[in-house]
Image (spheres, grey):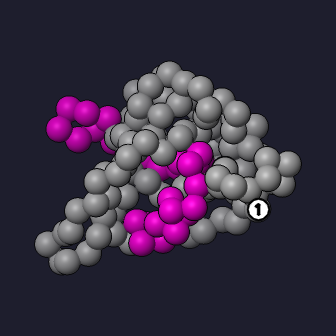
């Protein structure tokens, strides 16, 4: 799976930002209520408009084991949208929640691990955004 190519970059990005070491999607259920980092490839997103007329999004990512769901509320979504537009592989950081019987990651941040068209030899720069 393509996300496996970015595990090392994800680990370095998490370490540089002082975040937990990335887990794979199989570990999400046991992390309910905790903060996780997961390396995944962006699959799709559904943008919605809130009652206050702000954009948020429900997103799907996948790693080599499964698809995992995430949600980005307006403040976070407006901050991470440029990164989502740039890349295809990400370090997704957030809190694991259960909503309507399904697990999702409430996104705190995403870090782009790969930008199509960028040389594979050139490492992306990682800056912590908060």
Q: Residue at x 44, y 25 (%)?
A: 66
Q: Residue at x 49, y 29 (%)?
A: 25
Q: Residues within 10 Å of mark 1 (few under 14, many from 20)?
A: few
Residue 51 visible, this orientation = yes
Q: Establish if 75 lies above or below 100.
A: below
Q: Image check: 124 left or right of 96?
A: right
Q: Quadrant of the C terminus?
A: bottom right
Q: Image check: 117 left or right of 55?
A: right
Q: Nearer the viewer, residue 63 or 29?
A: 63
Q: Image check: 21 left or right of 62?
A: right
Q: Nearer the viewer, residue 4 or 28?
A: 4
Q: Quadrant of the N terminus?
A: top right
Give residue 29's quadrant in the image: top left
Tell me where residue 24 appears, x and y as whole percent.
56, 29
**Label 1 element class:** loop
Q: Is residue 47 magenta?
A: no
Q: Is residue 100 magenta?
A: yes
Q: Nearer the viewer, residue 56 or 94?
A: 56
Give the farthest residue toward the left.
51
Q: Which residue is mark 1?
A: 125
Q: Nearer the viewer, residue 119 or 47?
A: 119
Q: Establish if 4 lies above or below 70.
A: above
Tell me where residue 30 appears, x and y as whole percent.
44, 26
Tell me where residue 68 appears, x and y as whole percent.
40, 35
Tell me where residue 52 appears, x and y as whole percent.
18, 77
Q: Residue at x 72, y 61 (%)?
A: 126
Residue 27 visible, this orientation = no
Which residues are the magenta region?
76-103
């Amino acid at each position: 799976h393509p996300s496996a190519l970015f595990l090392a970059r994800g680990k370095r990005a998490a370490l540089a930002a002082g975040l937990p070491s990335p887990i794979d999607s199989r570990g999400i259920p046991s992390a309910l209520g905790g903060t996780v980092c997961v390396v995944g490839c962006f699959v799709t997103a559904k943008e919605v408009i809130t009652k206050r007329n702000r954009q948020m999004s429900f997103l799907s990512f996948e790693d080599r084991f499964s698809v995992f769901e995430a949600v980005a509320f307006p403040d976070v979504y407006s901050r991470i949208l440029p990164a989502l537009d740039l890349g295809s592989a990400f370090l997704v950081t957030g809190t694991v929640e259960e909503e309507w019987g399904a697990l999702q990651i409430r996104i705190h941040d995403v870090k782009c691990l790969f930008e199509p068209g960028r040389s594979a030899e050139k490492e992306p720069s990682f800056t912590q955004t908060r």
